[in-house]
Image (spheres, rainbow, N blue to C red):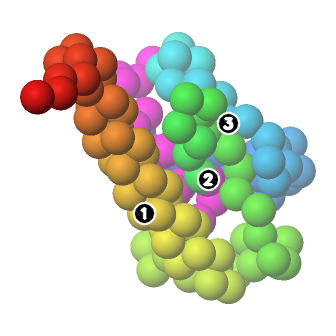
């Protein structure tokens, strides 16, 4: 019997396969999925992580999770769950997510430096 996070992930995959959710569409929010499935936030997070790992979804910080774009719609039908192979899409998404995470870290570092300079003022001696 599948675990709840697997049921949530498979339900969303089926909505994507059937065209109910199309590439670029927003996925239901964590709160919506928690209500719909009677699941905890951790369970919903695990389902979303599984969808992202397998190339079905991507995150946009501050915006939510969205259906991933695929080079070929047939790739979704050939998805080998657990191996994260979708015509190279997963690797590209992961690379972009890593680059985005690094950029966010650099922005946070620069912001902290600017704030420190503003708080300390400019001192000339």
Residue at 71 percent across and 50 percent down: it is 67
Chief secondary structure of the magenta portion: helix
| In the foreground, 35 or 30 | 30
Instruction: For label 1, count other residues whose C-alpha is less than 10 Å away and answer few (under 14), some (14-19) or many (20+).
Output: few
Instruction: For label 3, count other residues whose C-alpha is less than 10 Å away and answer few (under 14), some (14-19) or many (20+).
Output: many
Residue at 34 percent across and 41 percent down: it is 110
Kindly identify which residue carries mark 1. Answer: 98
Kindly indicate whether the residue at mark 3 contacts the one at mark 2 (C-beta within 8 angstroms): yes
> Is residue 86 rendered to the left or right of residue 80?
right
Kindly identify which residue carries mark 3. Answer: 27
Q: Of the residues under marks 2 and 3, which one precedes in the sequence?
A: 3
Question: Residue 94, percent across and down?
Answer: 49, 68
| In the foreground, 121 or 1 | 121
Q: Say how many tags the image has.
A: 3
> Seen from this angle, which residue lies furthest right?
19
Residue 88 in view here: yes
Is residue 40 rendered magenta in the image? yes
Kindly indicate whether the residue at mark 2 contacts the one at mark 1 (C-beta within 8 angstroms): no
Q: Of the residues under marks 1 and 3, which one precedes in the sequence?
A: 3
Q: Nearer the viewer, mark 1 or mark 3?
A: 1
Residue at 73 percent across and 36 percent down: it is 26
* Residue extent of the magenta highlight: 37-57
Using the numbered discs, state the Cα–Cα distance from disc 1 to disc 2 in whole angstroms. 15 Å
> Is residue 90 rendered to the left or right of residue 109?
right
């Amino acid at each position: 019997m599948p675990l709840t996070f697997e049921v949530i992930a498979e339900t969303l995959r089926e909505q994507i396969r059937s065209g109910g959710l199309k590439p670029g569409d927003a996925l239901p929010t964590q709160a919506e999925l928690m209500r719909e499935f009677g699941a905890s936030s951790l369970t919903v997070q695990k389902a979303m992580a599984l969808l992202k790992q397998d190339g079905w979804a991507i995150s946009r910080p501050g915006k939510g999770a969205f259906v991933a774009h695929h080079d070929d719609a047939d790739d979704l039908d050939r998805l080998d769950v657990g191996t994260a192979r979708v015509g190279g899409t997963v690797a590209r998404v992961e690379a972009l997510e890593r680059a985005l995470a690094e950029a966010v870290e650099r922005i946070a570092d620069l912001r902290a430096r600017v704030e420190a300079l503003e708080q300390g003022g400019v001192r000339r001696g």
